[in-house]
Amino acid sequence: MAKASRARKTASATHPRLFRTQNDLPATTRVEVCDLLNQRLADCIDLQTQCKQAHWNVKGPGFIGLHKLFDEINEAVEGYVDLIAERVVQLGGTALGTARVAAGRSVLSEYPLGAVTGADHVAGLAGALSEFGRVIRMAIEETDALGDKDAADLCTDVSRDIDKWLWFVEAHRQGEIASVQDD
Ligand SMILES: [Fe+2]
């Protein structure tokens, strides 16, 4: 399945249950936002595990800086996981955030498990941040269109941070003159 269509796929087939709440957003909005956010939750959990994979396995001259950076990103991403999951619950939904659910639903590419050097892990994590950045940016518009401006605001916060982390990671290879983009 193409990534774009997978990114749009929601989990409406599972857990349609909605708990009673005095939250004034219409139930139809809350169901759809919960489905959408549960998909992004799976992606975000996948991203977090990829940060740890990089943190543990990076080797080479730039080890300590990258080791610490990757863990800093991991801790931040753990916060986004919590924000997304708790928005689902605030709306009366059920956060679906086990490792098995995340593995089954994530639209992110598999992390390069053979990565060794700093360059390998910079490339791997930059890719994961870029992919998650794309779908969480899409979620800003999608949640806004569904009528949940608070979820859109949450996704905007996460998106802005992901762009920052992508910069922090990508800067390690942007010093190469060959990587300057002319267009
Ligand atoms: Fe550690």
Image: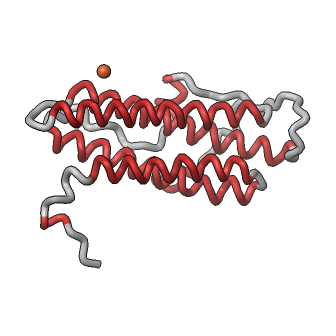
Q: Does residue 104 lie above or below 167 as drawn?
A: above
Whether residue 6 appears in this view of the structure is no
Marker count (numbered): 0
Question: Which residue is at 69% across, 53% downward?
Answer: 143
Q: How is the image coloured?
A: secondary structure
Taking 107 as reference, is 63 left or right? left
Taking 72 as reference, is 4 left or right? right
Q: Does residue 112 lie above or below 98 as drawn?
A: below
Q: Please state the horizontal and vertical placement of residue 176, each as a whole percent of the image.
A: 13, 61
Question: Which residue is at 64% across, 41% downward?
Answer: 37
Q: Please state the horizontal and vertical placement of residue 82, each as a whole percent of the image.
A: 58, 30
Taking 120 as reference, is 15 left or right? right
Q: Quadrant of the C terminus?
A: bottom left
Taking 161 as reference, is 40 left or right? right
Image quarter for residue 175?
A: bottom left
Question: Which residue is at 30% across, 36% downward?
Answer: 69
Question: Which residue is at 72% across, 45% downward?
Answer: 33
Q: Please state the horizontal and vertical placement of residue 48, each as a whole percent of the image.
A: 42, 32
Image quarter for residue 109?
A: top left
Q: Does residue 110 lie above or below 20 as drawn?
A: below
Looking at the rendering, the quadrant in which ligand 1 lies is top left
Q: Please state the horizontal and vertical placement of residue 92, each as a whole percent of the image.
A: 79, 32
Image quarter for residue 71?
A: top left
Q: Residue furthest bottom?
A: 183
Whether residue 102 appears in this view of the structure is yes
